[in-house]
Image (cartoon, grey):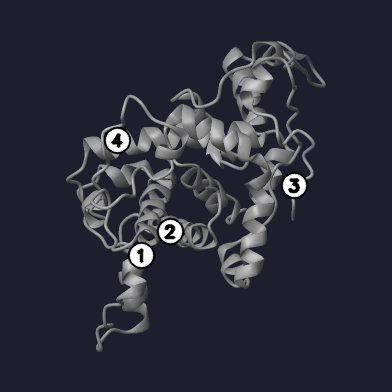
Amino acid sequence: MKTTDPHCKFTLEDEKAGRVKFKPPKVSVERMDTDTLFGMSDRERKSWYQGKISNYDNQLTESSIKNKIPKKLIAAIILNELADIQLADQIQEQLDLTDGSFGPAQMQVFDTALKYGHVDIIQSQLSSTPKTIITPRRVVSIPENSRIAIHISHRLRIMQVAIEAVARETNRLLNLMRANILKPWQKEHSLNPPPVPKKTTSKSIQSMYYEKGQIGGADKTTRFMYLCETVSAAYNSPDIIITSKEFKSPIKEAMNPAPEPESESPLQQWIRHYKKPYKNARAHGGNGGMIGSDIANFELFK
């Protein structure tokens, strides 16, 4: 489905300059799952990727330059989130909840967006957020922090805000990886992120983090795939960066499956599978890696 957003060419800098006023949709995400996505043909997947985010290339470029993160990595993280949207994700937006993950970035309001300042507060919009709720018995005041949370959950539904929030969070995660370079998840991918240069160009940023020697892989497509896997897993569960527990990359496991023990019962196989640490994060990473491989092979978001 292609975007119908009439403001897709505008960026957050345009909004700051008063050239546009973004209005969040009531529900910003559509149902999708990775089985459906990866069951599509190459042509269908490419069309799905492009339809979701290609029209926001101006914001991808702006956030890439500001945060020094490759455009295609930002796109891969968002597309990975949009590939795993359930009915509950739509309902929580419909009901205007603040607990949970919101928008194309599927970012948590309190634990991530507010905690790390990934979403800027627009004071003029915050001031219009209701300060009270009328109940059958009385008028109840809404605490300031709850009003801010509502405002942030609404802002996250705007694709431009989601792109910038993902770029900021990705930058934070890569810095955390630099500080924990010898931990198992980084070692599993031979991750060796370079120092961020003081001077960069839009072109030089696009190959940062997956040049030869910066992450495992014989060619650029493979290296980008592993970069997407590494970051996507951490985006789902940042603790995977700092844990001392050892485990394999799901993509590497799929490419080189270990033989199943012959004497195991189905129950023992199930227990062994679910006892693996960070199962959800690693599955999320594996999906992100496959989306990254598609992006590289389809030559998108350059």
Q: Residues within 10 Å of mark 4 (few under 14, many from 20)?
A: some
Q: Residues within 10 Å of mark 2 (few under 14, many from 20)?
A: many
Is 150 or 251 nearer to us in this picture?
251
Residue bearing mark 4: 176
Residue bearing mark 2: 289
Indicate which disc, 3 or 2, sits on the residue closer to the N terminus.
3
Image coordinates for residue 118, horizontal then vertical, percent: 50, 27
Q: Is residue 156 left or right of residue 9?
A: left
State whether residue 86 is above or below residue 144.
Answer: below
Residue pictured at 67% horizontal, 34% vertical: 158
Residue bearing mark 3: 3
Quadrant of res 224: bottom left
Element type at mark 4: helix
Disc 3 and disc 2: Cα gap in Å? 24 Å
Disc 2 and disc 1: Cα gap in Å? 9 Å
Circles 2, 1 touching at the beta carbon (< 8 Å): yes
Is 267 or 8 nearer to us in this picture?
8
Disc 3 and disc 1: Cα gap in Å? 32 Å
Indicate which disc, 1 or 4, sits on the residue closer to the N terminus.
4
Q: Nearer the viewer, mark 3 or mark 1?
A: 3
Element type at mark 1: helix
Q: Residues within 10 Å of mark 1 (few under 14, many from 20)?
A: some
Question: Could you tell me if residue 197 is visible in this image?
Answer: yes
Residue pictured at 45% horizontal, 39% vertical: 203
Residue bearing mark 1: 250
Is 176 or 207 nearer to us in this picture?
207
Circles 1, 4 touching at the beta carbon (< 8 Å): no
The residue type indicated by label 3 comes to Thr
Indicate which disc, 3 or 1, sits on the residue closer to the N terminus.
3
Indicate which disc, 3 or 4, sits on the residue closer to the N terminus.
3
